[in-house]
């Protein structure tokens, strides 16, 4: 540490320290003289009294000496510098403020939001800059951007921006913001500083391991390190995800509790026009679900909404989802195999709740619109396309063709270390074989437990595909008599079933038996996506909404259903299917309707990014021990401009004065007490 | 009688009031005039004392012939002799006696001594006066004449507070000057070592003196009724000490009380009369201790 005196010329004032000592040593009270007869007795008594009084006098002397020392140093105006800071104090400062305005900054833990506090502290940092210093401001949100394209001198403008800014509903992107900050300082000379003003939300920052270039000082300012207790609406979805008309579905809402104590929450669930409330006890730092059964009557989009009573962090108390109620499941037929595809198509046409959709070869866009894909004749080419479709939540039943390698199957199934060189091959059986149930307790066979629908695998088979599935995690639903896999469902979500059974009449009579169609239907129904992880997540704040229109007649608008506010949209490049409209990034959660001539054509839901709900800050300072961390801007300013000690000295002087006063008062009181006794 | 004179310490009004007082100490006196005071000397009087065997040189007239007739031995009848009283006054004239308001202790003691002298001489008894501080400043041998009284009054009037109190020294030095036993009256503030004082009194007591100690103290000395910080200047030594009267008052009072109690205790142990003479009370009240 370095200590300098701004008024060093007044150093002689330090001599004041000896004043009380001199007074104590040489000053004598000159009370009135009194001629007395018996001074010896008084002397004896005074000697006894002085034994008690002397420590008080010394204490008084010490306090008075310290008081004079504090006053003397007060006039010298000492300034304390942190070690190493004094040397660079004359250079131009280039300060980039990275101010977090992600949603978590809206948390309020005492009347003022974290963001308001952060802006105030950042403005104070800017106020400490001199006229020659340069500064810039980067807003840390989903898409961080700087106020100035390069370092600027107009700190007042930045301060105005800070005063007018509002917190966003978005998650932050710290790495991008820091990259921008470093880029701004690339060409700057003098002292280069980055000050990050954030709540350092753990869920956002703990994975950030940014390497700052040498020569850049990093400071972090935590306007609040408290954890705001928060309840959040985490998800709402239907089970099944694609309900059919007349089918009872469960609407499930998940509530999170980001607090150290369990909380009882009242969840309001809105399903279309229906509104119900459920109460749930959410464990500490846990989550709980409530469900409502609902039967859709109409085909079309159905808006599901769930909300909580408002708390200290209200942004995440609402969540919505749009499910499309279908009359029938869209079952896509991908590829072609003469032994399989016609039978599938015929079977689908027999099921009134299924709608067969022929997927043109290599057109994943059409496949993506399907609820389930039936893949036949796939020889292992371009497995990534099918893998991506699975990742979009589309379950599949696959009858691979000859030559499909185990590697291709591994890519499709998402397995690892399965490159054993095996291939799919067709085998004509010399002796017809029967197939038996491999997992009778599986949901696929639930319908058959009563015996009403007969044996699901009745029939004989004269041929089969040999599938290289050894070691693949999953369940063998059916096996040939010799143990070969007939129906195999791999683990994972969404479901993936491999079928080795021939469906054409030339190689078996299973499809003609009573149990085939029910088993086929059950296989499709049990593969329907039922969990939220398996479906494409809805948009979150900061995303743009997309509307694909056919031949549009009239103006397309995007409207916020709650407030009626119209959002700006742009018309993107069209394609053969029609026009594409893209909105600007949506800044608030809600239900948004695409309108064409005042008719709702599509509904989108924009949700709050649930990663922002956990408001716990980092346990330790970010970036390790690099840089300075402080809770207030004044502390950071003190690092640069030194800590003026005069306020402390003044405080010390006042305290010492009070102590001296109290001590003198105490001495007098004790003396008066003695007088009263006397 | 000096009614037509005006002495500083013996006012006509006081003389008139003293007319109703009589100085009659309880102790026996040893005087040279047969008088009203009982003496341990055998002599002629009407009060029979005892028989004793005749020795040559005795007055044959004193032989009790009746006893001779019964015992065939010469016995003399002895009688209690009434003699005049000798009163020896010791007046402390040290510097500390100059303390006191409105009258100093010395003035108060001088009034008392003057009255005593008057009473003694009025009874045709003899009175001596010793003025002392750290030694005997002046000694006025016993006398019973008006002239003697006049000399004593002048001595008192010219007396001024002197040096330190050395009562023990004064008593020691005065012992050879006092030939006959009588009543010894010490008027002092006794700012001396009590043990030394009583050691010096021992020869007097041994000789049969009746000793009266009058401890003269000003209320200001007893109570220390000053307030605030004071520079106390010793009247005898001139030494100074700064102290807060209010702070030391309690301790001072205790010390004074202890000092008085010790003197009282020592006096009682030696059959010495002790009386505290507060200067705020009239000195006539002190005569009660002499009767």
Image (cartoon, grey):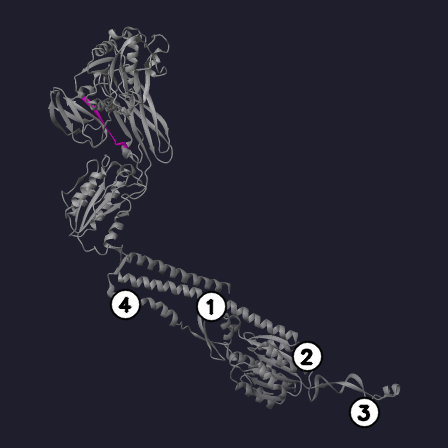
Q: Position of residue B220 (x, y in %)?
A: 51, 73
Q: For residue A63, say whether it is visible.
A: yes
Which of the labelled discs sits on residue B26, or is there none? Answer: 2
Look at the image and give the residue range highlighted in magenta.
A601-610
- CA gap between label 1 and label 3 equals 78 Å
Residue at 35% from the left image edge and 62% from the top image edge: A66
Q: For residue A631, say whether it is visible.
A: no
Residue contact between numbered discs 2 and 1, judged by CB atoms under 8 Å: no
Q: Is A183 drawn above or below residue A275 in the view shown?
A: below
Q: Is residue A384 left or right of residue B160?
A: left
Q: Is A229 drawn above or below residue B6 in the view shown?
A: above
Q: Nearer the viewer, residue A112 or B1?
A: A112
- CA gap between label 4 and label 1 equals 35 Å
Q: Is residue A85 left or right of residue A455?
A: left
Element under disc 2: loop
Q: Position of residue A200 (x, y in %)?
A: 28, 41
């Amino acid at each position: 540490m370095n200590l300098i005196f701004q008024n060093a010329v007044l150093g002689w004032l330090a001599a004041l320290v000896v004043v009380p000592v001199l007074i104590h040593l040489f000053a004598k009270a000159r009370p009135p003289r009194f001629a007395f007869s018996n001074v010896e007795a008084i002397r004896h008594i005074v000697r006894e009294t002085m034994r008690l009084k002397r420590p008080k006098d010394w204490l008084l002397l010490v306090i008075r000496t310290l008081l004079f020392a504090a006053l003397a140093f007060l006039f010298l105006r000492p300034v304390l510098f942190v070690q190493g800071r004094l040397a660079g104090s004359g250079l131009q400062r280039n300060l980039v403020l990275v101010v977090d305005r992600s949603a978590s900054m809206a948390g309020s833990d005492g009347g003022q939001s974290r963001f308001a506090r952060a802006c105030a502290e950042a403005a104070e940092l800017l106020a400490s800059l001199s006229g020659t210093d340069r500064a810039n401001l980067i807003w840390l949100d989903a898409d961080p951007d700087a106020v100035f394209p390069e370092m600027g001198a107009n700190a007042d403008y930045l301060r105005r921006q800070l005063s007018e800014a509002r917190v966003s509903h978005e998650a932050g992107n710290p790495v991008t913001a820091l990259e921008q900050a470093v880029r701004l300082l690339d060409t700057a000379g003098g002292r280069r500083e980055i000050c990050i003003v954030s709540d350092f939300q753990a869920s956002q920052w703990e994975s950030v391991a940014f390497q700052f270039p040498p020569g850049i000082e990093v400071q972090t300012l935590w306007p609040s390190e408290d954890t705001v207790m928060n309840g959040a609406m985490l998800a709402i979805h239907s089970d099944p995800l694609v309900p059919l008309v007349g089918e009872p579905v469960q609407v499930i809402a998940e509530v999170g509790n980001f607090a150290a104590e369990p909380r009882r929450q009242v969840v309001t669930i809105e399903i279309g026009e229906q509104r119900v409330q459920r109460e749930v006890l959410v464990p500490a730092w846990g989550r709980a679900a409530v469900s409502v059964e609902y039967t859709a009557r109409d085909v079309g989009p159905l808006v599901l909404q769930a909300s909580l009573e408002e708390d200290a962090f209200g942004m995440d108390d609402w969540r919505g989802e749009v499910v499309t109620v279908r009359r029938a499941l869209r079952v896509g037929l991908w590829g072609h195999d003469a032994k399989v595809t016609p039978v599938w198509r015929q079977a689908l046409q027999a099921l009134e709740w299924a709608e067969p959709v022929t997927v043109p070869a290599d057109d994943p866009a059409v496949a993506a619109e399907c609820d389930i894909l039936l893949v036949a004749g796939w020889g292992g080419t371009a497995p990534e396309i099918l893998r991506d479709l699975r990742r979009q939540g589309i379950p599949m039943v696959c009858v691979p063709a000859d030559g499909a390698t185990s590697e291709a199957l591994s890519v499709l199934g998402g397995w690892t270390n399965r490159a054993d060189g095996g291939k799919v091959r067709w085998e004509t059986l010399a002796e017809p074989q029967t197939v038996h149930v491999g997992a009778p307790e599986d949901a696929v066979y639930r319908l058959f437990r009563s015996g009403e629908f007969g044996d699901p695998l009745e029939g004989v088979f004269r041929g089969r595909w040999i599938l290289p599935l050894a070691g693949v995690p999953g369940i063998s639903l059916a096996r040939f008599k010799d143990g070969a896999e007939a129906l195999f469902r791999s683990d994972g979500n969404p479901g993936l079933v491999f079928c080795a059974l021939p469906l054409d009449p030339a190689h078996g009579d299973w499809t003609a038996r009573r149990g085939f169609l029910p088993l086929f239907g059950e296989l499709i129904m049990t593969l329907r996506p039922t969990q939220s992880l398996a479906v494409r997540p809805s948009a979150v704040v900061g995303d743009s909404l997309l509307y694909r229109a056919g031949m549009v007649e009239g103006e397309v608008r995007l409207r916020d259903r709650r407030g009626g506010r119209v959002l700006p949209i742009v018309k993107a490049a069209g394609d053969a299917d029609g026009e594409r409209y893209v909105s600007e990034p949506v800044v608030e959660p809600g239900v948004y309707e695409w309108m064409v001539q005042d008719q709702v054509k599509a509904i989108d839901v924009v949700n709050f990014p649930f990663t922002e709900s956990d408001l716990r800050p980092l346990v330790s300072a970010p970036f390790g021990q690099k840089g300075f961390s402080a809770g207030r801007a004044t502390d950071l300013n003190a690092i640069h401009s030194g800590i003026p000690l005069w306020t402390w000295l003044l405080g010390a002087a006042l305290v010492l004065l009070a102590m001296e006063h109290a001590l003198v008062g105490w001495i007098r009181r004790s003396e008066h007490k003695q007088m009263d006794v006397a | 009688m000096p009614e037509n004179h005006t002495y500083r310490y013996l006012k006509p009004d006081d003389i008139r009031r003293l007319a109703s007082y009589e100085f009659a100490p309880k102790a026996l006196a040893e005087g040279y005039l047969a008088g009203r005071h009982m003496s341990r000397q055998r002599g002629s009087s009407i009060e029979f004392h005892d028989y004793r065997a005749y020795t040559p040189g005795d007055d044959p007239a004193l032989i009790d012939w009746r006893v001779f007739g019964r015992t065939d031995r010469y016995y003399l009848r002895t009688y209690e002799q009434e003699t005049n009283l000798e009163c020896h006054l010791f007046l402390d004239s040290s510097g500390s006696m100059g303390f006191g308001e409105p009258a100093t202790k010395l003035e108060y003691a001088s009034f008392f001594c003057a009255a005593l002298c008057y009473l003694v001489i009025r009874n045709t008894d003899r009175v001596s006066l010793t003025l002392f501080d750290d030694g005997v400043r002046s000694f006025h041998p016993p006398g019973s004449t008006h002239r003697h009284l006049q000399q004593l009054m002048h001595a008192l009037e010219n007396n001024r507070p002197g040096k330190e109190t050395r009562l023990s020294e004064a008593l020691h030095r005065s012992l050879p000057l006092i030939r006959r036993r009588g009543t010894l009256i010490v008027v002092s503030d006794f700012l001396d070592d009590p043990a030394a004082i009583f050691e010096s009194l021992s020869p007097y007591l041994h000789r049969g003196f009746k000793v009266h100690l009058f401890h003269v103290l000003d209320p200001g000395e007893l109570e220390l009724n000053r307030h605030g910080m004071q520079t106390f200047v010793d009247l005898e030594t001139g030494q100074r000490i700064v102290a807060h009267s209010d702070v030391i008052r309690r301790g001072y009072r205790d010390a004074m009380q202890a000092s008085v109690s010790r003197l009282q205790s020592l006096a009682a142990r030696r059959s010495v009369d002790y009386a505290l003479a507060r200067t705020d009370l009239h000195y006539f009240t002190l005569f009660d201790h002499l009767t």
